[in-house]
Image (tube, rainbow, N blue to C red):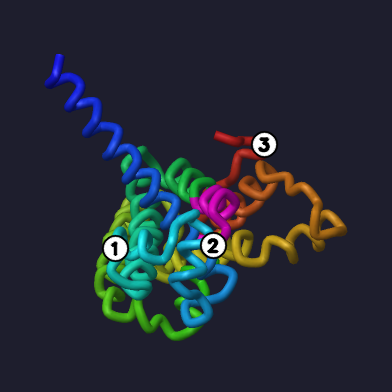
Amino acid sequence: MAETEEKTGREKVLDRRRKVHEAIRQAAIDEFAANGFSGTSTQAIATRAGLTKAQLHYYISSKEELYEKILLEIMDEWRDIFFISSSEGEPEKVIREYIRKKLEFGWKQPNASRVFSNEVAAGAPFLRKHWLQSLHAAHDAASIFQSWIDRKLILPVDPLLFQVHMWAVTQHYADFGQQVRVMVGGDEQAELDREHIVEEVSTLFLRACGIPAKTGQHD
């Protein structure tokens, strides 16, 4: 009985710590997205997370470390999106699934996407030392594209630039959502037809590599 109560107590503590860490992470993302790295203070992060500054520093060592950790988590998630998709089959399915997941990430987590974009636009001062890791992932993905080319499953494309172009298009919907809403809906509050966007973006890239898109397919 005592052992069960002790275990329950530990689980409650761990659950609370997880919730605090997630609150800090989300507060930091929102602050960094709104104010940039230099314009964000640990006090602002603490306040948004519902903590005192002293409590915040119990969980993090510095603003710099927290910012870099968030950037790496975003980069890892985007890498995983492609490789999870690529394990599921042939080019059309992989490209469709990757584009859908990348767009959905931006729609669900626009501030996280914006933090990453702002870092890169600023010259990647924190990410620069991690570019080799990102480059390895891009080359691994390029090898998958090259295998499709060699098997004549897709037309010859530049495997690295094809990835860059997919990043650019999908990223636009996260970073410039207001512009998209105005262009297609007439105002900044317009609801986007996300399935239509997924289909249009997928069709764009499928056609680029010679795969006839199946109109209306929303797998």
Residue under numbered circle 3: 216
Left or right placement of residue 133 versus residue 44 in this view: left
- Residue kind at label 1, given as amino acid type: Ala
Observer-side mark, 2 or 3, equals 2
Observer-side mark, 2 or 1, equals 2
Residue that appears at 60% across and 51% down: 107
Residue under numbered circle 2: 30
Determine which quarter of the picture holds residue 125. bottom left
Q: What segment carries the magenta color?
A: 102-113
Identify the mark at residue 3; answer none if there is no mark. Answer: none
**91 falls in the magenta region:** no
Could one spot residue 145 in this view of the protein?
A: no
Q: What secondary structure is marked by label 3? A: loop
Determine which quarter of the picture holds residue 78. bottom left
- Residue kind at label 3, given as amino acid type: Gly
Residue that appears at 51% across and 72% down: 117
Residue 87 placed where, x, y %? 31, 42
**Mark 2 touches mark 3? (CB < 8 Å):** no
Q: CA distance from mark 2 to mark 1?
A: 27 Å
Q: What secondary structure is marked by label 2? A: helix
Left or right placement of residue 107 versus residue 61 in this view: right
Of the two numbered discs 1 and 3 on the same chain, state the one appearing first in sequence: 1
Residue that appears at 43% across and 45% down: 94
Of the two numbered discs 2 and 3 on the same chain, state the one appearing first in sequence: 2
Q: Nearer the viewer, residue 168 or 173?
A: 173
Prevalent SS, magenta region = helix
